[in-house]
């Protein structure tokens, strides 16, 4: 196991800079999710840690030592990709042990390590099968087993579950988390899926356009997003945004929407009258019905989406669609008026120009 540190890392492809002087540090044993939209540089960053991609500028340290000049093998990392790339003519056991055999590990030792990994991943019964005789989830487990047997200092995952169907993805997510709790190996997990990042990681790094937007625990990012990008990226359904101007309302700070609706704001915020802001309201913080305490948002219901336990209601406020999550039993019909309350301390406020949280 080892810590991982990036110091002023830059990556250019010709004239195009895709990673801009990025620094971060990952503690020994931590599970880090690197999350961001497609093309933001996640794979590039992971591949630079792995030694599969040249580093234009800066230093990568693993276990406190600079590894820029080391080959992937010398870095003692193991990577799990979206495509499992198993050898079709080898059995599960042979696939899992292949790298160890290449490294000259003795046969009884290989058998012991493959056996242990197989037990951990519930693959013991499948050791003699060929990859073609396995389901997608089982193949992905073999790919993880192949990484585990090497007992690497760091696991690097690049969207390993993207090829699996939704149900299997959730199941494998749990297995990866369980596995990390058992072996405790430092892990960097790349995904574009914020729910995967939230559920798996000790800390999340949100990447956007080759820059870090924010680093924090899942709940820190959810509760205190430092800007509009993180606020809109973390959370499902996504946060609602409404443009407003800061005003005093009945002696308390409030924000006025374009249709005149006043939204009370937390008085502890440092706001000035007339300031142009963007309000952020999470769908799950809108309480349906006239009884909720707080400011009221009301409008015509555009779409009603039942999911079972909850229903997503999209309604119009100041000309903008706003989503609320209500109890699945709450009666609401398309085309009718919908009303929901929002408490002042649940309203996020961002500067409209910079996008930074206020
Ligand atoms: P992600 O994994 O977040 O989807 P990548 O790290 O694969 O993103 O890519 C980051 C950016 O670098 C993208 O804009 C991509 O087009 C660009 N890129 C990746 N590989 C190359 C390459 N070999 N040559 C030129 N541009 C590349
Ligand atoms: Mg990628």
Image (cartoon, rainbow, N blue to C red):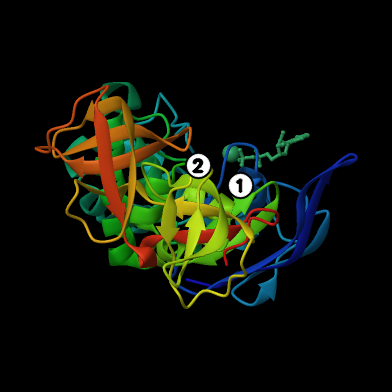
Q: Position of residue 71 (x, y in %)?
A: 69, 55
Disc 1 on helix, strand or loop?
helix
Which quadrant holds the C terminus? bottom right
Alpha-carbon neighbours of circle 1 within 10 Å: few (<14), some, or many (≥20)?
Answer: many
Residue pointed to by mark 1: 42
Q: At x 41% / y 68%, what residue is drawn?
A: 250
Q: Give above or below for 175 relative to 68.
A: above
Q: Nearer the viewer, mark 1 or mark 2?
A: 2
Q: Are marks 1 and 2 in contact (CB under 8 Å)?
A: yes
On whether ligand 1 comes within 8 Å of the CB at mark 1, the answer is yes
Alpha-carbon neighbours of circle 2 within 10 Å: few (<14), some, or many (≥20)?
Answer: many
Q: At x 42% / y 56%, what residue is drawn?
A: 263
Disc 2 on helix, strand or loop?
loop
- Furthest-left residue in this view: 329
On whether ligand 1 comes within 8 Å of the CB at mark 2, the answer is yes
Label count reads 2
Residues under labels 1 and 2: Cα distance?
Answer: 9 Å
Circle on res. 209: none
Q: Give above or below for 316 relative to 207.
A: above
Q: At x 26% / y 50%, what residue is drawn?
A: 174
Residue pointed to by mark 2: 192
């Amino acid at each position: 196991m080892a810590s991982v540190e990036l110091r002023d890392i830059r990556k250019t492809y010709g004239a195009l800079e895709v990673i801009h002087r990025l620094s971060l540090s990952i503690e020994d044993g931590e599970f880090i999710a690197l999350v961001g939209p497609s093309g933001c540089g996640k794979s590039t960053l992971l591949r630079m840690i792995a030694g599969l991609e040249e580093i234009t500028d800066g230093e990568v340290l693993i276990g406190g030592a600079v590894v820029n000049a080391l080959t992937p093998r010398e870095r003692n990392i193991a990577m799990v990709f979206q495509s499992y790339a198993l050898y079709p003519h080898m059995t599960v056991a042979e696939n899992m042990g292949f790298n160890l055999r290449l490294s000259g590990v003795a046969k009884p030792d290989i058998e012991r390590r493959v056996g242990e990994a197989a037990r951990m991943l519930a693959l013991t019964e499948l050791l003699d099968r060929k990859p073609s005789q396995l389901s997608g989830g089982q193949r992905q487990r073999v790919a993880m087993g192949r990484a585990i047997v090497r007992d690497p200092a760091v696991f690097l995952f690049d969207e390993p579950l993207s090829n699996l169907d939704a149900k299997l993805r959730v199941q494998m997510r749990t297995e990866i988390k369980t596995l990390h709790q058992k072996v405790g190996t430092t892990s960097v997990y790349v995904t574009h899926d914020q729910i995967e990042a939230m559920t798996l990681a000790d800390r999340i790094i949100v990447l956007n356009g080759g820059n870090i937007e924010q680093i924090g625990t899942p709940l820190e990012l959810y509760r205190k997003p430092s800007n509009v990008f993180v606020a809109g990226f973390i959370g499902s359904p996504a946060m609602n945004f409404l443009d407003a101007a800061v005003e005093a309302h009945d002696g308390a700070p409030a924000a006025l929407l374009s249709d005149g609706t006043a939204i009370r704001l937390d008085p502890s915020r440092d706001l000035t009258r007339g300031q142009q802001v963007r309000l952020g309201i999470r769908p799950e913080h809108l309480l349906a019905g006239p009884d909720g305490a707080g400011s009221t948002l009301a409008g015509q219901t555009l779409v009603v989406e039942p999911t079972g336990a909850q229903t997503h209601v999209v309604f119009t406020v100041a000309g903008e669609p706003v989503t609320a999550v209500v109890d699945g039993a709450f009666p609401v019909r398309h085309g009718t008026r919908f009303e929901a309350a929002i408490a002042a301390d649940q309203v996020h406020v961002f500067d409209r120009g910079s996008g930074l949280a206020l």
